[in-house]
Image: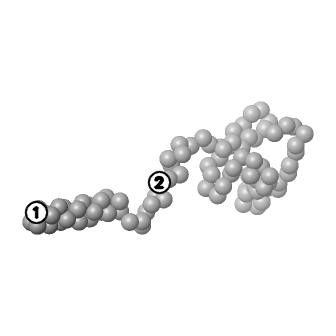
């Protein structure tokens, strides 16, 4: 972003600042994105924190079917089929 692309936002009474939509879109800032505040001289920089992409996946499968349980159940059914084939053959 060049210096000619100036955007403004007002600080609320709670200290909140809204990042303009164009910047949120350009830098892919979604709800929950962690940003860092850095000082450089008389400037305050807001920088998206580089996070490990795996951090965003934590808890995404919570409440879903347990893959381990499904595998154990599948293996038990397979074992029953194999035992039935041995009895017949």
Residue located 85% across and 37% down the image = 2
Question: Is 65 situated left or right of 33 in this image?
Answer: left
Question: Is 58 situated left or right of 3 in this image?
Answer: left
As helix, strand or loop, the secondary structure at mark 1 comes to loop
**Label 2, residues with CA under 10 Å away: few <14, some 14-19, many ≥20:** few
Q: Position of residue 12 (x, y in %)?
A: 77, 60
Residue located 10% across and 63% down the image = 89
| Residue at the right extreme, as displayed | 4
The earlier-in-sequence mark between 1 and 2 is: 2
As helix, strand or loop, the secondary structure at mark 2 comes to loop
| Residue at the top extreme, as displayed | 41
Residue located 47% across and 54% down the image = 58
Mark 1 touches mark 2? (CB < 8 Å) = no
Quadrant for the N terminus, please. top right
Name the quadrant containing residue 20. bottom right
| Residue at the front extreme, as displayed | 89
Using the rendered image of the protein, determine whether residue 60 is visible from the camera's viewpoint: yes
**Label 1, residues with CA under 10 Å away: few <14, some 14-19, many ≥20:** few
What residue would you read off at disc 2?
58
Name the quadrant containing residue 9. bottom right
**Closer to the eye: label 1 or 2:** 1
Name the quadrant containing residue 11. bottom right
Q: How many angstroms separate mark 1 from mark 2 (CA)?
A: 48 Å
Using the rendered image of the protein, determine whether residue 76 is visible from the camera's viewpoint: no
| Label total for image | 2
Residue located 85% across and 51% down the image = 8
Q: Position of residue 83 (x, y in %)?
A: 13, 63
Q: Position of residue 39 (x, y in %)?
A: 72, 37
Closer to us: 38 or 19: 19
Closer to us: 8 or 31: 31
What residue would you read off at disc 1?
89
């Amino acid at each position: 972003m060049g210096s000619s692309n100036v955007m403004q936002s007002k600080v609320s009474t709670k200290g909140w600042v809204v990042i303009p939509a164009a910047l949120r879109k350009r830098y892919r800032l979604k709800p929950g994105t962690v940003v860092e505040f850095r000082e450089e001289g008389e400037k305050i920089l807001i920088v998206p924190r580089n996070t490990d992409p795996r951090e965003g996946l934590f808890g995404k499968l919570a409440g879903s079917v347990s893959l381990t349980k499904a595998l154990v159940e599948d293996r038990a059914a397979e074992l029953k089929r194999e035992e039935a084939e041995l009895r017949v053959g």
